[in-house]
Amino acid sequence: MTKAEVISPAGNLASLKAAVDSGADAVYIGFSDSTNARNFEGLNFTHEEIAEGIRHVRAKGKKFFVAVNTFPQTDTCAKWRTAVDRAVELGADAVIIANLGILKYARDRHPGANIHLSTQASASNYESINFYNRHFGIKRVVLPRVLTVREIKELKKNTDVEIEVFALGGLCINIEGRCYLSSFVTGASTNTEGACSPSRFVRFAPTNGGGMTISLNNVLLNRLGPEEYSPYPTCCKGRYIRPGNETAYAIEDPESLNVLEILPGLIEAGVAAFKIEGRQRTKSYVASMTGVMRQAIDSYYSSPSSYTVRPEWSARTVASFEGSRETLGSYLVK
């Protein structure tokens, strides 16, 4: 049995090293531009950083994937094609792509490249996955976080494409990153710029009593008390006034995905890789979550029948929550 992989986020060089040193089988990175879906200031890699990062990955015998997973427009396609070329020239073990045109370019220009289908493509059934495999030769698909374990098992019975799923970290419920809420509020497209709630539009302001307001392009997303935790400032995780003057999370509670308790079921359903969300998170988060995922997977393969979630894993995941609680997302029930 081939062991399921741990795929860790690397938003910068420090996180890359932390992931590899903590047991990741592969890291996923992006270039410092709009071709990837985490195009935030201070994230991603310069030419010098990526060279050092690759040396570290190779020295440890691990892999690196490059995300080129946003959507070019007519006048920007050249940038995405260049990103694919550069990823292949760097020796990336996989290029993660979402857009049909860029998939075609990658397959035509680089027939030997290993292509993974990004979760941004929202391929959630075996017919669409097999379509991508047939026409673009994808070897792996990162599933959107909308399927149950049961559905994943049935899907895998009908495709030879490897399955990768999200295991730990934040959730994205709105067509897996192809949401238009941020675009509607800011005028800057998440899907083409690569950043949901771009930082230039986010404002934090203190309130009387020690609280804080968070706004996006002058649209109020949240008003926090002095002891309240701030989720990532996106429209979907905002609190709004409902009928009856009730203030509540109207679209999505700020929860963190954690699949450790159902890890055996996912592996037995045919999952080949577990992805940790969080290229925007700190190196300590990356190291901690990678270590937990590494230990959990190793524990399962060591003795599948006696697998159990260890207290120290739970303590570390709780300490790293982006939201107020953990969730299994849609893995058990929708």
Image: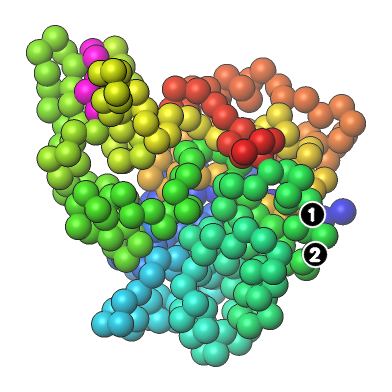
> Dot 1: within a 10 Å radius of its alpha carbon, few (fewer than 14), some, or many (20 or more) residues?
some
The residue pinned by badge 2 equals: 158
Q: Secondary structure at mark 1?
A: helix
Residue type beneath disc 1? Glu
The residue pinned by badge 1 equals: 154
Residue extending farthest to the top is 209
Q: Secondary structure at mark 2?
A: loop
Residue 208 horizontal/vertical position (percent): 10, 13
Q: Which residues are magenta?
A: 222-226
Residue 5 horizontal/vertical position (percent): 69, 51
Looking at the image, residue 153 lies above or below residue 101: above
**Which image quadrant is residue 48 in?**
bottom left
52 to the left or right of 74: right
Residue 225 in magenta stretch:
yes
Residue at image coords 61%, 22%: 314
294 to the left or right of 103: right
Residue at image coords 14%, 9%: 209
**Which image quadrant is residue 63 in?**
bottom right
What secondary structure is the magenta-colored segment mainly?
A: strand
Looking at the image, residue 276 lies above or below residue 110: above
Quadrant of the image for the N terminus?
Answer: bottom right
